[in-house]
Amino acid sequence: MRKIQAVIFDLDGVIVDTAQFHFIAWKELAAEWNYTLTPEDNEKLKGVSRMDSLNKIAQWANVQTKPEQLLDIAHRKNEIYLRFCNQLTPQHVLPGISTLINTLKANGVFISLGSASKNARFVLDKLGLLDVFDVVVDGNDVSKSKPNPEVFLKAAQRMGVSPEHCVVLEDAPAGIEAALAANMKVIGLGDAIELQKAHLVLENTINLSLVQLNQIKIKGVA
Ligand code: BG6
Ligand code: MG
């Protein structure tokens, strides 16, 4: 069996739990449209770019808004979001991630970020992880948002690794679809039913070993 050469990490929900910040910020803006954003709605926004998320909320709220107003709302949402992110510290890196990163680096496996967020570099810096990745591809580098595979393909290309030698770590259905469309292996982190299209689903990366990463061709390997 061919060994993996690179691991591509999603950011929000994989490295750090920022979904709650996105939720609070979107909820505040959706309220201006008299729409109560639910946790279920928020699940559908995971992995989705800022503007695509806003368009979805506008649809749910059944409002039609001019493009310049949408840009203003997106800007205000980001200001709220960044106020929360500003409080992040290295202690907010999710359990298992730092050990996994160290193991991969010690074994010569490339690591890249593959995130839809335009705030990725800011968040990585707050977490003390900005210089750790060989490659960072984020929302500023792509024109098509997940489930389009662009973000992961760009990461693989910049690392000089072919897609079939990459494993993606993702917490969102849109990200799993993007990884599969990129012809990569993908581990879902979170709910086994929601992420069932992944090759393997784990609660977190605490016990994720290199051996296991090399075995994920087989669905359900524990
Ligand atoms: C993804 C999040 O990582 O980034 C989405 O899961 C978010 O919820 C998207 O909308 C874009 O983030 P940002 O920071 O550019 O608004
Ligand atoms: Mg995510």
Image (cartoon, rainbow, N blue to C red):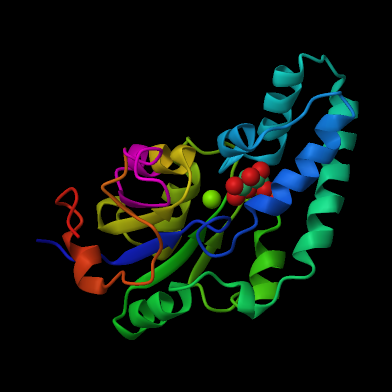
Q: Quadrant of residue 93?
A: bottom right
Q: Quadrant of the N terminus?
A: bottom left
**Is 82 colored magenta in this rendering?**
no
Report the residue at 78% width, 38% height from top. 27
- Residue 144 in the image, given as x and y percentages of width and height: 56, 36
Point out residue 176 in the picture as x, y percentages from the top left corner.
40, 42
Q: Residue at x 46, y 43 (%)?
A: 175
Which residues, given as a range, are shown in magenta? 179-196
For the C terminus, the quadrant is bottom left
Rendered position, 24 above or below 59: below
* The furthest residue to the bottom: 106
Q: Is residue 192 magenta?
A: yes
Q: Residue at x 90, y 27 (%)?
A: 69
> Vertical placement of 47 versus 17: above or below?
above
Q: Is residue 128 visible?
A: no
Horizontal relation, residue 82 to residue 43: left or right: right
